[in-house]
Amino acid sequence: MKILVCITHVPDTTSKIQFTADNTKFDSTGVQYIIGPYDDYALARAVELRDQASGKLTVMNVGEADSDPTLRKALAIGADDAIRVNAAPKDSYFVAQQIAHYAKEGAYDLILMGRESIDFNGGMVHGMVGELLGMPSFSPVMKLDVDGSTVKMAREIEGGKEMLEASLPLIAGCQEPIAEWKIPNMRGIMSARTKPLNVVEPVSQETQAEASKYELPPAKGAVKLVDKDNVAELVKLLKNEAKVL
Amino acid sequence: MSILVYIEQAEGKVKKTSLEAVSFANALAAQTGEGDVIAVALGTIGNEELASVGKAGAAKVLHGAESKLDAGVIQAHASAVAQAFNLVGAKTLVLAKSSLGDAVAARLAIKIKAGLVSNVVELPKTDSGYLVKRSIYTGKAFAETSVTTENKILAIKKNAIDLKQDGAAAQVETFDVALEDADFASKITSTERATGDVLLPEADIVVSGGRGLKGPENWGMVEDMAKILGAATACSKPVSDLEWRPHHEHVGQTGVKVAPTLYIAIGISGAIQHLAGVNSSKCIVVINKDPDAPFFKAADYGIVGDAFEVVPKLNEALKAEL
């Protein structure tokens, strides 16, 4: 089985979000970049599936050279090789076109990625790639087992989940608890240095919905504390002041 | 010309978030002169329920009544909505952001060659260009997105607009969906859904518990409060990791993102990853015995005290007032 995992290179979840250049650029000063947490779940499950089926696992990112350490980390976690499409990810459609092109070339049986990136939170790329390749797409998938060419999945829906059955090839946007995050060990880190990381050029420059300007939400006012022996006061405030009851 | 809205149903009832999408489309049509709002509904739904979508601002509802569409089969729904889009000659599709909505919208974007913006928080600026404000970095910032395609899809975040409730009944029309076997290549074998409860992503009030509650056996008072308020229950990540509560209740960076009118956090310290899931709430109340809990910095109201003392008293006070 040939598996492709697409990962994002995103600011750590604890990063302070700030912008520069008159609010047109993300301020990466002091920001630690990581594999998107949802992509990390997808990768962890892919490593398990690859090991079960003795297949091959490729990891892909659409990004510039600063993504390379993130791809190396994915190799250390267990991917066999990596592809970086050498372009800043301008919007979901732009990214989907690159992935669809190189995924078709690689003829993968299973394409996994996170349900959404944690920077732009679009959650659209897997569906777009699915439609571009004429493959079924599923998201958010919280369980995925492969038996021959049959795939059994659980997909989260509002207030519950649905169980699905489909056939390979397919695409899934993943989330917990599909697998436990894997932490690279020393052997993985050493071997990642020599695994292939191929840089390829984007196949299209077309975009549809690019972000042009950013802003931060207004600062929150100070909390109003209510004494623990006077909880009725809180109810009054919620009713009359905040008007939320 | 019309704006098309894809509305979702659960057990024959139109979702409230879909009605918000209808109201959003109604306001957008008034702004851009795109004519009427036409909703498309799929699967088994009663005519009366469909006509009531008019209250939120739809003139017409196209009903693809095939019972095969009752379940949210992603490929089939995407095909059906694309057919409706072409049938009415719309240029804009509006839908509510949801598990199914997202999955369907992404495929549609390719099918109808539309620029797609998700997590939309307010009406676009359309006087020059087409600028859409969306929530990014899990609610920690906003981006203005410029859509350059003729066809457009907007996936609306909850509470992006007030629900319109004074529209006339909508005209209901059946439309024949041409479905191919390939659309049903995957099948839903079973569905597990908490029934009778308020669904978390759609709830106006959310009562949430953290590790401070010490164990799943102590959730009774949280459920009591939810019952009194007509709220949904939620929890922090450690609580769902410990399996004290089901995973679909986990609110935070990697869980459900909620945007209720009122979010009450009990025994949750407020890690940055948890805040990312709740920062779109209108009003946040924090109950925690640690006065230095970071959650107080993100709260509108707070009580420093032991949840096991405060919550039962608060439940009594709420009961007396409501």
Image (spheres, coloured by chain):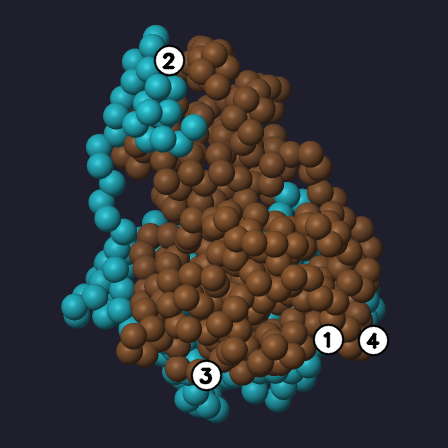
Chain colours: A cyan, B brown
Secondary structure under tag 2 reads: helix
Q: Residue A21: x, y in percent?
A: 17, 70
Q: Residues within 10 Å of mark 3 (few under 14, many from 20)?
A: few
- Dot 4 corresponds to which residue? B181
Q: Amino acid at mark 4?
A: Asp
Direction from residue B68 to residue B13 in the image, left or right:
left
Q: Quadrant of the N terminus of chain A?
A: bottom right
Label 3 marks which chain's residue?
B
Q: Which subunit holds the residue at mark 1? A: A
Which residue type carries mark 1? Pro
* Residue B203 x %, y %: 53, 40
Residue type highlighted by circle 2: Ala
- The amino acid type of the residue labelled 3 equals Glu
Q: Residue at x 29, y 18 (%)?
A: A226
Viewer-nearest of labels 3 and 2? Answer: 3
Q: Label 2 to label 4, Cα distance in Å?
A: 59 Å
Q: Nearer the viewer, residue A75 or B146?
A: B146
